[in-house]
Amino acid sequence: ALAMGKELAGRPLIFLAATDSTNRVALEMAEQGGGPAVVVAESQSGGRGRLQRQWHSPPEAGIYASFLYWPRLEPQDLAKLTLAAGLALARALEKNTGLHPGLKWPNDLLLAGKKCGGILCECRLVAGTGKPAVVIGIGLNVNTPSRDIPPELQHKATSLRLASGRTWDRGVLLAALGQELDIVVATMEQGGFAEILASWRKRDALLGHELDWLTPNGQVVRGISLGPDQHGILQIRDHQGCTHEVISGDITANLG
Ligand code: BTN
């Protein structure tokens, strides 16, 4: 099991053996005015992903953690914080495993072109606080064996273990993640998104690749990724030379 103390990188840690969703728990704490904290679960029965998807969260295998922040940021900066969180996750892994994960807009973490982690940021405006509460939810497949990856996801999902051939200490990775998140949140609060974006772009797995964007109204736009712009909005150039700005929707690319 994930052995844990009572705090993680200086913030209170709430460890749950099992829950539905650590994001749900952290948002509830925010609504009750709770301070910065991290909620970690050994397994989740209803792990939430982007676009109403489920995050498969078997016990022993992964990191399922939700970090609650009250950052001094404007609501329009919160989408940028999602990119910043992806960068923090990539840095935590690079420093502790030597692996070189790629980032897929807006916030998937890739190893060898397959997804091994994802981020779901959710925010709440809590009356009387003057700042938004932000929950940065992180799911990372760490020691997940192949048999725990559903058959329909085998071609596009992986774990650190599958990509590197060994297992990793989840507690070490989680502590590093807490530190790296604090760094990017502080950088954002100091108006440093340009710096974050520059680091993010170095790890951009889609840049220059052909991709399909499934728009929120169900159209498919095919084009080449130009990467996120200074607002964190993904730019795609279609084959007629038109540029499309992507703020939401699903991106698929053949990175194999
Ligand atoms: C995605 O790739 O769509 C984002 C997945 C985010 C999953 C994590 S697991 C911990 C936290 N709690 C949740 O319910 N979701 C996030």
Image (tube, helix red, strand yellow):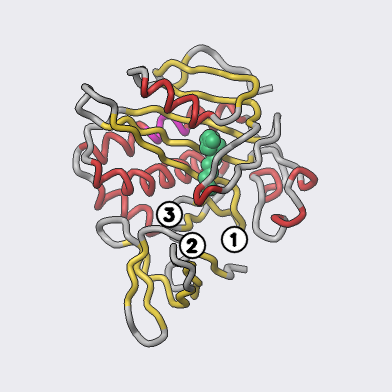
Local SS, label 2: loop
Q: Is residue 174 above or below residue 205?
A: above
Residue 172 lies, in percent from the top left, at: 55, 28
Q: Main secondary structure of the magenta part?
A: helix
Residue depth check, mark 3 versus mark 1: number of the one nearer the observer: 3
Distance, label 1 to label 2, CA atoms, is 8 Å
Please report contact status of discs 1 and 2: CB closer than 8 Å, yes or no. Answer: yes
- Residue flagged by tag 2: what amino acid is it? Ala
Q: Which residue is mark 3?
A: 106
Q: Residues within 10 Å of mark 3 (few under 14, many from 20)?
A: many
Q: Residue at x 53, y 29 (%)?
A: 22
Q: Residue at x 77, y 54 (%)?
A: 151
Local SS, label 1: loop
Q: Is residue 49 above or below residue 208?
A: above
147 vs 158, left or right, is: right
Residue 113, label in figure: 1
Residue 159 lies, in percent from the top left, at: 66, 46
Residue at the far bottom in the pictured view: 240
Q: Residues within 10 Å of mark 1 (few under 14, many from 20)?
A: many
Please report contact status of discs 3 and 1: CB closer than 8 Å, yes or no. Answer: no
Q: Quadrant of the N terminus?
A: top right
195 vs 14, left or right, is: left
- Residue flagged by tag 1: what amino acid is it? Gly
Residue 150 lies, in percent from the top left, at: 74, 49
Residue 102 lies, in percent from the top left, at: 50, 55
Q: Earlier in the sequence, mark 3 or mark 1?
A: 3
Count of marks placed on residues: 3
Of residues 98 and 60, the one drawn nearer to the viewer in this rendering: 60
Q: Which residue is mark 2?
A: 205
